């Protein structure tokens, strides 16, 4: 009536109609983009390796958590059946004897546990434990590792 025209089929749609039409086209694009970002997120959870080291000392009949023991993680060489290259990570145990490594990709590894002799500057017993990580999100917990000092008397 007062300055308002009835829409005709040959006129372009109004601003609101164009916006709704364009938004309807972008919804599938945004949905697919979000799907791919979430499905192929590069920050996928990597595996972890954690465990406990205990020690038995000369003359002692029981084991105690190993303190200040060096636990080192090496990647295994699949052809030579031995660690390949430099260490990936090292951990020094505290009073509880626990160790933990994070963000480890799947593969074959060697855990090397090296004790320290309290009566001299040299290192104590050494023990290797092979572990396999089969999935990226795996939490590997090997059996308790026992360092045996009982055959090494001080002095």
Image (cartoon, rainbow, N blue to C red):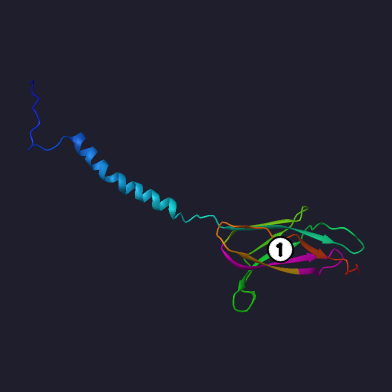
Q: Quadrant of residue 78?
A: bottom right
Q: Residue at x 54, y 55 (%)?
A: 45
Per the image, is 117 magenta? yes
Q: Is residue 81 left or right of residue 119?
A: left
Q: Outermost residue, bottom direction?
A: 80
Q: Is residue 145 left or right of residue 110?
A: right
Residue receiving disc 1: 71
Residue 41 position, x and y percent, is 46, 54
- Point 30% across, 44% down: residue: 27
The dominant secondary structure in magenta is strand
Helix, strand, or loop for circle 1? strand
Q: Position of residue 74 (x, y in %)?
A: 64, 68
Report the front residue among 138 and 154: 138
- Residue 65 located left or right of residue 2: right
Q: Is residue 31 above or below residue 104?
A: above
Q: Residues within 10 Å of mark 1 (few under 14, many from 20)?
A: many
Where residue 83 appears, x then y in whole percent? 64, 73
Q: Quadrant of residue 114?
A: bottom right
Of residues 48 and 90, the one nearer the viewer is 48
Q: Which residues are magenta?
A: 105-126
- Residue at 43% over, 53% down: 39
Image position of 23 (left or right of 120) = left
Which residue occupies the foreground of this view, 123 or 76?
A: 76
Above or below, comparing residue 129 to residue 8 in the picture: below
Q: Is residue 1 magenta?
A: no
**In the figure, 102 relative to 149: above or below?**
above
Image quadrant containing the C terminus: bottom right
Q: Position of residue 77 (x, y in %)?
A: 60, 75
């Amino acid at each position: 009536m007062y300055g308002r025209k009835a829409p005709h089929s040959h006129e372009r749609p109004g601003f609101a109609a164009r916006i709704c039409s364009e938004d309807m086209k972008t919804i599938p694009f945004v949905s697919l983009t979000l799907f791919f970002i979430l499905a192929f997120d590069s920050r996928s959870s990597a595996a972890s390796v954690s465990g406990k080291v205990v020690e038995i000392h000369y003359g002692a009949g029981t084991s105690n958590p190993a303190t200040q023991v060096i636990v080192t993680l090496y990647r295994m060489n699949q052809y030579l059946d031995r660690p390949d290259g430099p260490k990936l990570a090292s951990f020094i145990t505290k009073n509880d004897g626990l160790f933990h490594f994070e963000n480890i990709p799947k593969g074959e590894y060697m855990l090397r546990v090296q004790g320290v002799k309290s009566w001299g500057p040299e290192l104590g017993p050494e023990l290797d434990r092979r572990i396999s990580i089969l999935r990226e999100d795996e939490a590997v917990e090997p059996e308790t590792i026992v360092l045996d000092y009982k055959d090494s008397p001080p002095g």
